[in-house]
Amino acid sequence: MKAVAVFPGSRETKVVDTEEPRITEPDQVTLRVLDVGICGTDWEICTFEYGTPPPGDDHLVLGHEALAEVVTAGSAVERFEPGDLVVPTVRRPCPHPGCLACRSGHQDYCYTGDFSERGIKEAHGYMAESVVDHERDLVLVQPDLRDVAVLTEPLTIAEKALGQILWMMRHRPPWLDPRTPGEERGRGLSALVLGIGPVGLLGAMTMVSAGFTTYVYSRELPPHPRTDLVGAIGATYVSTRNETFAELAERIGNVDVIYEAVGHSHFALEALEVLGTNGIYVLTGVPGLQAFVEADPARLMRTMVLKNQVLLGTVNAGADDFAAALRNLDLFRRRWPEAVRTLIAGRHPLERAAGLVLGRPAGIKTVISFDSAGG
Ligand SMILES: [Zn+2]
Ligand SMILES: [Zn+2]
């Protein structure tokens, strides 16, 4: 079968012919891959900044944002049958008996760092015609989400963040609003999303649908397809070239939530200065090596203490976040059909993967498609 693999030794990314994987345990399924999204992590892997092949292998099969169809199910598989659509989670647990996170199925919170990640760290990914997975690592997708389910994995970042924001809102008294039990708990509160890449845009959709008055702040000047999309979902776009952080904060009022999705450390630090009283700041970007800047930690510390602020980092996501992402994708596509359609920039054959990963992204989310019927 064909797969796209990166070879760190020879520093190349290419289509390879490899053996089709087979079920070796009764709780596994074989999957036919349909769609795989590409993102900045793939770029980092293909430029050899990040990523590790499985032990003993000279290459790593790329791809961690996948949608697939079950082809065969092992004898102990209970939840899936051939024909079902599934989205796989990315991280697999570390082997250490003392890691409470991994031992309870929450490997996105792994303590040891010895986890593996499909398509990223010590485990082959999904940019292959066929893959094998354990039942426990798969989430069922309803058939009518076929066209958009490849967005599930990038959306889980926002879902995991929102889950924690909502939990804190319930447990931090100033934010309790008895009039809005259950849903739209962000009503009356503001959220500032930094960045309009796929993670930022999906984060903005998540915040809007949770009821937050949502602003998106990034470099691009409108008109631009991504800034148009921000308007289409009912959020407000502001360009860094038109307003400073201070001006933006004055317009917003109390900045209740900041969702960072740019991975730029200076920008992230500047944003911290406009976080409001009782504000929650969520960092999702992983910056590479960047220029050193001077900061005033005493002032930052004073502000954070006196304003009851929370600074939260979040990485990866668990099975619950994947399920929440699929529920929200269904909602997004009903509420903003055109915007969700434009999120997927195009579907391309396997042979173009290396060029697309390394090239400048043309649209929002580029997808490698294995399904000729998928277009
Ligand atoms: Zn990704
Ligand atoms: Zn662990």
Image (tube, rainbow, N blue to C red):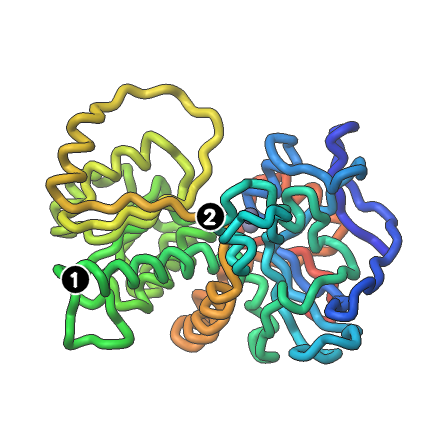
Disc assigned to residue 315? 2
Is residue 286 at all visible to an observer of this figure? yes
Identify which residue, 89 or 152, lies in the foreground. 89
Checking the image for residue 233, the label placed there is none
Residue 206 is left or right of residue 175, and the answer is right
Within 10 Å of disc 1 (Cα), the crowding (few <14, some 14-19, many 20+) is some
As displayed, is residue 13 above or below residue 151? above
Q: Regarding mark 2 in the picture, which secondary structure is present there?
A: loop
Residue pictured at 61% horizontal, 66% vertical: 87
Q: Amino acid at mark 2?
A: Val
In percent of width and height, residue 344 lies at 54, 60
Q: What residue appears at the point 17 percent right and 26 percent down from the top-left corner?
A: 298
Name the disc covering residue 175, or none.
1
Q: Earlier in the sequence, mark 2 or mark 1?
A: 1
Q: Is residue 25 left or right of residue 266?
A: right
Spot occupied by residue 142 in the image (x, y as percentages of width and height) = 58, 78
Identity, as a three-letter code, of the amino acid under mark 1: Trp
Give how far across and how far down residue 229 sits, in percent.
Answer: 39, 59
Ligand 1 is within 8 Å of the C-beta of the residue at disc 1? no
The residue lying at 83 percent from left, 58 percent from top is: 21
Marks 2 and 1 in Cβ contact (< 8 Å): no
Foreground of the two, 306 or 241? 306
Q: Is residue 372 visible?
A: no
- State how far apart marks 2 and 1 are (Cα): 25 Å
